[in-house]
Image (spheres, rainbow, N blue to C red):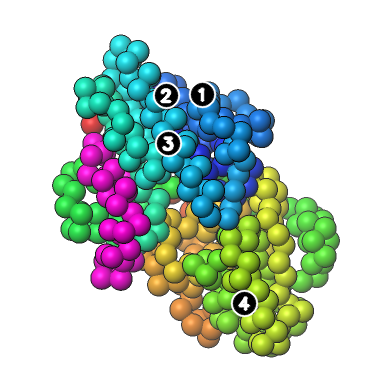
């Protein structure tokens, strides 16, 4: 069966901004191609797509909606609806022409919802419909999110109920989908996101020194956070945990990179740095292009820090491990990424972990991080799991 990987319409694949779901679509497709599995990406039309050698069929939308947007405001929502309706029309044509069954792999609630609403059941029966839930809200206790789910994510609930296979990214998500939505457990598959271990890899000491100099961080020890600047990602929470360490060692800096989703929150982060008296040690690096540039950024860090309130899967932490950079997990989320990751619930635990980084034990931690990423999170193994479950 041919697999159609369906881009979300948020930003074109390959993504020119750090966009986790679009990275998943791209990397899964590459892995399927390496397996000689017939695959094609359906994605939003654009004149701004990055150079690629992927099999992409564009879904035409008005030019107003073809650019990437990180504000997630009303234009973003309208764009999702416009693209989803155009996508459904394209899928209807594909299914009408299909001589054998195909797999449609959705990654976004809008796309799946409008497909189910507008494509007749007779045509839908010509496809195995898979849905991967990337939505971090499903990682929270149901008692905290029940109302939000039914008000804001009713499309996702509908899509998962109709899908033949639902892929989820952590055990809490799986439990919520089965117990709270009532989807049979044999249709819910626990999986992980992978990492391009060839792209995200350790650099030499000379290369790292050059990148640090480029960012004006020569001689500094960097704790790095990668992710959109908003309250969920928690750059402010990271600063509060790091403040005691930063005050003790002026050579340590907290650097964060990502698009500013909330200008108000970014202002709060900057004010918090002033209130904590660590302004000179807090550096915003802006939005960094995914891929090689992001790998260079990971490599300048002693460790990365993860502090999200909710997340489907902390892809940035796995990318960090692949670059040979330990990941400090300062969140209550139920993640265990294995070797190279360290849970730090308090400032004291974080400082203790940091003190190890400059020692022989820290060097071993970096080696173990890289080996763990290669062993557990290669896209080849992730794609094989997807394929096995899609076709079963």
Q: Residue 84 carries which label?
A: 3
Q: Do the residues labelled 1 and 3 touch (CB within 8 Å)?
A: no
Mark 1, secondary structure of its residue:
strand
| Magenta stretch bounds | 140-167
- Inspect this view and state whether residue 356 appears: no
Distance in Å between CA atoms under marks 1 and 3: 15 Å
Distance in Å between CA atoms under marks 2 and 1: 10 Å
Distance in Å between CA atoms under marks 3 and 2: 10 Å
- Total labels: the figure holds 4
Q: Do the residues labelled 2 and 1 touch (CB within 8 Å)?
A: yes
Mark 2, secondary structure of its residue:
helix
- Earlier sequence position, callout 1 versus callout 3: 1
User: Tag 2: Cα neighbours inside 10 Å, few (<14), some, or many (≥20)?
Assistant: some
Residue depicted at 78% across the width and 53% down the height: 207
The spot of residue 259 in percent (x, y) is 63, 57
**Residue for badge 1:** 57
Q: Which mark is residue 90?
A: 2
Distance in Å between CA atoms under marks 4 and 3: 35 Å
- Earlier sequence position, callout 4 versus callout 3: 3
User: Tag 4: Cα neighbours inside 10 Å, few (<14), some, or many (≥20)?
Assistant: some
Distance in Å between CA atoms under marks 4 and 2: 44 Å
Residue depicted at 39% across the width and 67% down the height: 333
Mark 3, secondary structure of its residue:
helix
Q: Which mark is residue 268?
A: 4
């Amino acid at each position: 069966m041919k697999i159609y990987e369906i881009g979300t319409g948020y930003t074109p694949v390959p993504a020119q901004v750090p966009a986790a779901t679009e990275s998943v679509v791209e990397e899964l497709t590459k892995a399927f191609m390496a397996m000689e599995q017939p695959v094609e990406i359906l994605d939003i039309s654009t004149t701004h797509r990055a150079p690629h050698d992927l099999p992409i069929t564009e879904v035409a939308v008005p030019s107003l909606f073809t650019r990437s947007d990180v504000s997630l405001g009303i234009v973003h929502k309208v764009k999702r609806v416009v693209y989803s309706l155009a996508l459904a029309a394209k899928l209807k044509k594909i299914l009408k022409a299909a001589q054998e069954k195909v797999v449609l792999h959705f990654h976004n609630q809008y796309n799946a919802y409008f497909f189910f609403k507008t494509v007749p059941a007779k045509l839908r029966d010509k496809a195995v419909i898979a849905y991967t839930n990337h939505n971090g809200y499903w990682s929270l206790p149901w008692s905290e999110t029940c109302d939000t789910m039914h008000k804001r994510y009713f499309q996702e609930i509908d899509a998962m109920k109709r899908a033949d296979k639902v892929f989820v990214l952590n055990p809490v998500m799986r439990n919520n989908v089965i117990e709270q939505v009532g989807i049979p457990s044999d249709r819910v598959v626990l999986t992980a996101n992978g990492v391009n271990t060839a792209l995200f890899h350790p650099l030499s000491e000379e290369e790292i020194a050059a990148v640090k100099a480029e960012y004006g961080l020569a001689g500094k020890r960097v704790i790095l956070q990668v992710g959109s600047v908003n309250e969920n990602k928690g750059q402010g929470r990271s600063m509060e945990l790091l403040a005691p360490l930063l005050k003790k060692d002026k050579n340590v800096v907290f650097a964060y990179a990502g698009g500013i989703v909330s200008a108000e929150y970014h202002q709060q982060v900057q004010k918090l740095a002033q209130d904590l008296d660590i302004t000179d040690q807090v550096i915003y690096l802006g939005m960094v292009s995914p891929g090689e540039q992001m790998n260079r950024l990971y490599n300048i860090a002693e460790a990365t820090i993860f502090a999200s309130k909710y997340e489907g899967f902390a892809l940035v932490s796995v990318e960090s491990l692949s670059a040979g950079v330990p990941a400090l997990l300062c969140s209550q989320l139920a993640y265990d990424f294995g070797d190279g990751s360290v849970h730090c619930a308090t400032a004291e635990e974080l400082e203790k972990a940091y003190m190890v980084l400059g020692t022989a034990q820290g060097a071993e931690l970096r080696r173990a991080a890289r080996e763990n990423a290669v062993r557990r999170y290669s896209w080849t193994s992730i794609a094989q799991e997807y394929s096995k479950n899609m076709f079963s």
